[in-house]
Amino acid sequence: MIQSDNIEMLCVDDIHTYYGKSHIVQGISFNVSAHECVALLGRNGAGKTTTLRSIMGLTPPQNGKILFKGVVIQNLPPFEISRNGIAYVPEDRQIFTTLTVMENLNLALKKHQKDDGWTIEKVLDIFPALAERRFNRGNQLSGGEQQMLTIARALMSNPDLLLLDEPTEGLAPIIVEILLEVIINLKKEGLTILLVEQNVSATRTVADNYLILQQGKIVYQGDNEDFWATPALQKKYLGI
Ligand SMILES: Nc1ncnc2c1ncn2[C@@H]1O[C@H](COP(=O)(O)OP(=O)(O)OP(=O)(O)O)[C@@H](O)[C@H]1O
Ligand SMILES: [Mg+2]
């Protein structure tokens, strides 16, 4: 596998994704470079989740190409895409509510652990709130703690690319701040992140580049500076 830093981590090239006859993702192309965070924005129903699901192979695109670390992945099943190094954190927090934090993390541990990969200890270091709750069950956790556990579980697969779907949704501002700090730390750890958010202001400190989706098409691509220097964008495409 090619592991050069010179190539893009993810190349999405003119993908089209359907739900039945509905043409949802209508020819999207973008790149995500290694170690950067790209924010994917757009109104409700724009196709953000479908784009993440397309990359993960959960709703595979019917046309177009997706390259991850130089390897064609758009025809692979989700478990192989995961094995290649992509982890998906869906909107609905996927944890086992009757199991403890430790049990949830243990179940997510991969059989093929990497020597330099994530361990439960390392994950608990990055989420001190979870460390304190390690013997509590999923259903005893706050919304923020459940979101942290969902991300922690995703990290156990040692991904290079993390797909986060609205991680701050429904969380109190103080918890949002904590999560954003975690995302910044994950970037420092070398992760590449594709971040879907409705909470646009929350992306300001973490996103290097921006994409805006409208009705299944990309209508804007730009860097952090350009995005925040152009408030008209938010008004036009996001209704803010
Ligand atoms: N399983 C499905 N079957 C049919 N249509 C679907 C399905 N899931 C989503 N859609 C439709 O696809 C379009 C895009 O949905 P998607 O969930 O990707 O949008 P989104 O940008 O993530 O929106 P939100 O901000 O509400 O999460 C919407 O019109 C939605 O109704
Ligand atoms: Mg969505």
Image (spheres, helix red, strand yellow):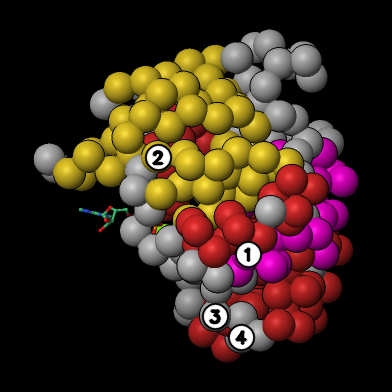
**Looking at the image, do the residues carrying marks 4 and 3 touch, with CB atoms under 8 Å apart?**
no
Query: Label 2 amino acid?
Result: Lys
- The Cα–Cα distance between marks 4 and 1, rounded to whole angstroms, is 23 Å
Of mark 4 and mark 1, the one earlier in the sequence is 4
Q: Start and end of the magenta stretch? A: 181-205
Picture disc at residue 142? 4
- Is disc 4 placed on a helix, strand or loop? loop
Which residue, given by chain and number where applicable, does mark 3 sit on? 170
Which residue, given by chain and number where applicable, does mark 2 sit on? 217
Give the x, y percent position of residue 207: 73, 50
- The Cα–Cα distance between marks 2 and 4, rounded to whole angstroms, is 36 Å
- The Cα–Cα distance between marks 2 and 3, rounded to whole angstroms, is 27 Å
Ligand 1 shown in quarter = bottom left
Picture disc at residue 200? 1
Residue 84 appearing in the image:
no
Query: Label 4 amino acid?
Result: Ser
Q: Which residue is drawn at 17% across and 44% down?
A: 22
Query: Label 3 amino acid?
Result: Gly
Q: In this view, does 219 lie above or below 146?
A: above
Label 4 CB sits under 8 Å from any ligand 1 atom: no
Q: In this view, does 168 lie above or below 4?
A: below
